[in-house]
Image (cartoon, rainbow, N blue to C red):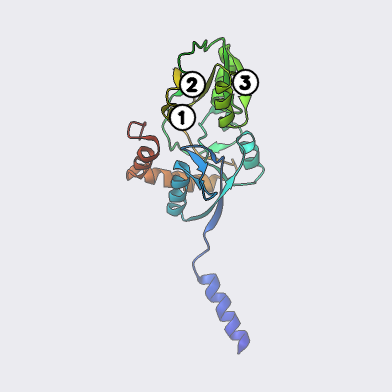
Amino acid sequence: MKKMMLTALVAAFVAGPALAETVRMGTEGAYPPYNFINDKGEVDGFERELGDELCSRAKLDCVWVVNEWDSIIPNLVSGNYDTIIAGMSITAERDEVIDFTQDYIPPSPSIYMGMNGASVNLNGGVIAAQTATIQASYVAESGATLVEFATPEETIAAVKNGEADAVLADGDYLAPIIAESNGEFAVVGEVSIGGGVGMGIRKSDGALRAKLNAAIASVKSDGTLNKMIAKWFGADAPQF
């Protein structure tokens, strides 16, 4: 009798709804408003809100993993997490190593930020950029002297302490810093580089990429994504 009951329980479990697939969402946690660590020690920001919504629509059980930017692609490839959702622009160079979903942020300009009132030679001066970014690659090819730093905060410090004449980074990241600097910093140049921002996926994970692409298409089509962009980047930010 006990054996029959056990068999029935196993059969009921097998026939029941499948457990949601667990997906580890890799992010930097240091690039507001895209992603940052809040006062509770949790991943927060635009990409946290978007990522949770995508996981809900794709019926995925998602957990968040924080990783330093300069090793974020190698650690995806090696299996430390399953996606990159970290303000990463879609580029041909990166696409040789990993795959991308469709973009969830349209292409937006990068800006140079320097000290207010300072004269900056963008093509011959010393320009700071975060390591392994499209901005660092652009500066390296521009004729300026590139100084690279592991974190975005260090690039800002380099300008402030005179180690660099300016920093080149996403306008979405630098604009709030300039606005809150009480006139200390200013925009000293602008350039359009790279494509939109997408999620990085291992090339072997085509099924996961398809699920996330469908979820991104869904938040685009019903206006949810544009509302999130306006919330985190302002009503004037490029939308879909």
Task: Please indicate, yes or no, whether residue 121 appears anywhere in the rendered image.
Answer: yes
The answer to whether 58 is drawn above or below residue 92 in the figure is: below
Q: Which amino acid type corresponds to the residue marked 1 in the rendered image? A: Ile
Give the CA separation, mark 3 to mark 2.
14 Å
Q: Residue at left 65%, top 37%?
A: 74
- In which quadrant is the N terminus drawn? bottom right
Q: Secondary structure at mark 1?
A: helix
Assess whether mark 2 and mark 1 are in contact (beta carbons under 8 angstroms): yes
Read off the residue under disc 2.
Answer: 113
| Label 3: how many Cα within 10 Å (few below 14, some 14–19, many 20+) | some
Q: Residue at left 65%, top 41%?
A: 75
N-term mark: 3 or 2: 2
The answer to whether 110 is drawn above or below residue 209 in the figure is: above
Q: Which amino acid type corresponds to the residue marked 3 in the rendered image? A: Val
Give the CA separation, mark 1 to mark 3.
20 Å
Where in the figure is residue 233, as x and y percent of width and height?
A: 39, 35
Read off the residue under disc 1.
Answer: 177
- Name the disc covering residue 147, or none: 3
Task: Please indicate, yes or no, whether residue 191 appears anywhere in the rendered image.
Answer: no
Name the image quarter holding residue 21: bottom right
Q: Secondary structure at mark 2?
A: strand
**Residue extending furthest front?**
182
- Residue in front for this viewpoint, 12 or 115: 115
**Residue extending furthest right?**
78
Give the CA separation, mark 1 to mark 2.
9 Å
Where in the figure is residue 121, as x and y percent of width and height?
A: 52, 10
N-term mark: 1 or 2: 2
Where in the figure is residue 218, as x and y percent of width and height?
A: 38, 46
User: On the picture, is 233 further left or further right than 27?
Assistant: left
